[in-house]
Image: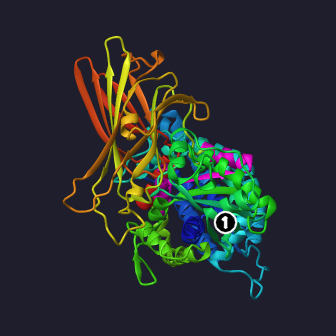
Amino acid sequence: MSGQIKLDKKIKVKKARRVWKGRRPLYLLAFVFIIAALVVLAAGTYFILIPAQKVSTAVQNIAGTADRMRTDFDKRDLSRLDEYVNEIKTQLDIVNAEVTKYDFLQEVDLTKGYYNNLQVLRRLSDKSQVLITDILPDLKVVLKAIGYQVEPTDVPVEGEVTGDEEQLSGIIAELPRFVELYDQVEIQLTELIEIFNELDTNYIPSIGTGGLKSKVVTAQKVTREFPAISAQLKQTLSILPALLGSQEPADYLVIYQNEKEMRASGGLLSAYGHFQIDKGELGDDISATDMWDLEGYVSWTLGIDVGYRNIYGQNALMNFGCGSTYLRAQDSGIYPDLYWTMDTFKDYYYWANRYNPKKYPAYDHIVILNTFFASDVISLVEPLEVDGKVITSENAAKEIFAETSSQPLDPAIRKEFIGRVATALKEKFNQLSAADFPRVVQTLIRSMQAKNIAFYSTKPEVQAYFDELGLSGRIEKNFAGDYFHLNEAQNCSLKSNFYVYDTVTQNITINDSGDIRKDVRVEWVNEKVYDPNEPFIISNSAFFRYRAWVRLFMPKGAKVINTDGYEKSRYFYWPVEYFDTKMQKQISDNVIYFDHRRLTEADPIRRHDLNVSYSLPAELNYNTAQGYKLLLQKHPGKKDELYVINVNHAGANTSVEFRLDRDKILTYKDGVISVTDFDKRLDDYYDLMEGFKSQ
């Protein structure tokens, strides 16, 4: 699983590197360019309405100066920065002086709107000069600190850092100073944008396709969101130093999940590892170790009982031949809440670190990820060639498991192939261009929304940031409506979740009084015929028949009417209903057990099902004003699980079918069902990248 560490770490570094290398987005300096562009845009509008050669020439001079400044910026030579800034200020003075010549327009009703816009332009020019004057001294200090020549007397020393990677490290090291500088200019920048948004677009001539008026309208739509965007930017800038090791190295503990061996939190916790980021650069020493190493050290070498136990159906299955009542480190993800899993796992790791900090080093943050995340990342650069094998997003997990299962049980030997995959991935990412950056970010966002990766931090301010963006993989506990989560944890069936998939059907019946009854049917299907080349996935031994702990998470107050879980467990486990205080959900706790193996094509497709019926509490009764809302939370580690929803109400049946690729909200009202995404906090970033792709 060490490859997955490198997948995660290299994407973070390459993401930052491509932004800085391709776009050179030194945001504070870009403010100068933006301000100049706004002046050009506003002034240019009136060149069409009121020919003014001096203003036109001044604006052209500003644009030319900005171009020269950008060229020098690419060369990291800003020794003429003062000259450029003074030239821009001189040209802004010319614009100001010329604009005052059109005061007569305020006396004519037909042109009064244009006059008011001209006054906006004048104020915009004044504020721009103030901002440039205020920001320049501190900006030059920061630029010099990261290796730019900002004075004519600054001569680069031979051997001085000049590469893009080194520049990135310098920028990351100076992030705290960028935050301070941004704090200084935010108010002025906000005022500039407020002035710009005072432009009345009714008094801007619309000339041609994509004319000035349309550009102003577009710019105003974007800049009206600036206060919210600025708040997010400030928060991100304040958190990044801790994540990227700006002032001191940031140490990460990584938990690898194998979702092909399904567990409640998405997959068996199959391995753990470490990496360090120092000034944005990933360290060379990346580790990945089988989870048995940690479990053996804590439980057997140290003889420490961490205190956790298997519960309900998982306890029954573990004592049926796959473990014990004691909750091992690798099985500690007994809830679908990834934050809970990481928070619990650290209790095992705590003892190992306490007694052997060299082998089990301390950490600042935790990352939990699965092989779907690896596939998502590989999809950006596939195919990879490793040891004569062709690795793609489709076969990555299978190739890795095939290789590791053929190796001795020595964790170091078993993980070598993963390291080589990660190295090949790194080489491919080095070939990406800046134009690929938006696609990379979008892929990472979708992977996070699918819960293929989540984050935890020992630092409260960083953890608060993760939670605010929905990056911690938490179960929602305060939804005002119906709730459903199907949770599954197969035990002792090898990696059969490569091929065993389920479909969830919910029949929702609303009677005349608004009472709601739900009949849920889950059907598991395996179409795969046994392949002797894949014994590590599906065995032909009856011992590895499919057995799983299955829980239905419902809202508090729901009452289970019926479940056939006892029959579907082959009369092994009596279902249990209870309220779980940790997840704040009513639970129907079941076990299923069936022979999922198809040994020949002539064998029928293997199927099994579970049926649970329950009623919702009275406070969730249907009413015509509010309708019915259902939050469906995705199981980490499952991909595109099929959901079929049938609503029976007022003598009619309304149905919808969809894939649960992320958490969804289903709404039924006035005989219509709609399904929308639930947590959209990262969608704005996704859409922003879509805009970059179109440029």
Give the mark count: 1
The secondary structure type at the circle numbered 1 is: strand
Q: Which residues are magenta?
A: 440-468
Residue 334 image position (x, y, % from top left) = 56, 45
Nearer-the-camera pick, 590 or 171: 590
674 above or below 561? below
Q: Which residue is mark 1?
A: 274
At label 1, the amino acid type is His
* Residue 441 in magenta stretch: yes
The C terminus is located in which quarter?
Answer: bottom left
Q: Is residue 68 left or right of residue 464?
A: left
Q: Is residue 391 visible?
A: yes
The location of residue 384, given as percent across then percent down, is: 43, 77
Crowd band around label 1 with a 10 angstrom C-alpha radius: few (<14), some (14–19), many (20+): many
| Nearest the eye: 132 or 27 | 27
User: In the shown orientation, is residue 370 left or right of residue 283?
Assistant: left
- Please determine whether, in this image, residue 418 is positioned above or below residue 36: below
21 versus 43 height, above or below? below
- Considering the image in quadrants, where does the N terminus appear? bottom right
Color theme of the render: rainbow
Q: Position of residue 378 (x, y in %)?
A: 45, 68
Residue 230 visible from this viewpoint: no
| Percent position of residue 449, x then y | 49, 49
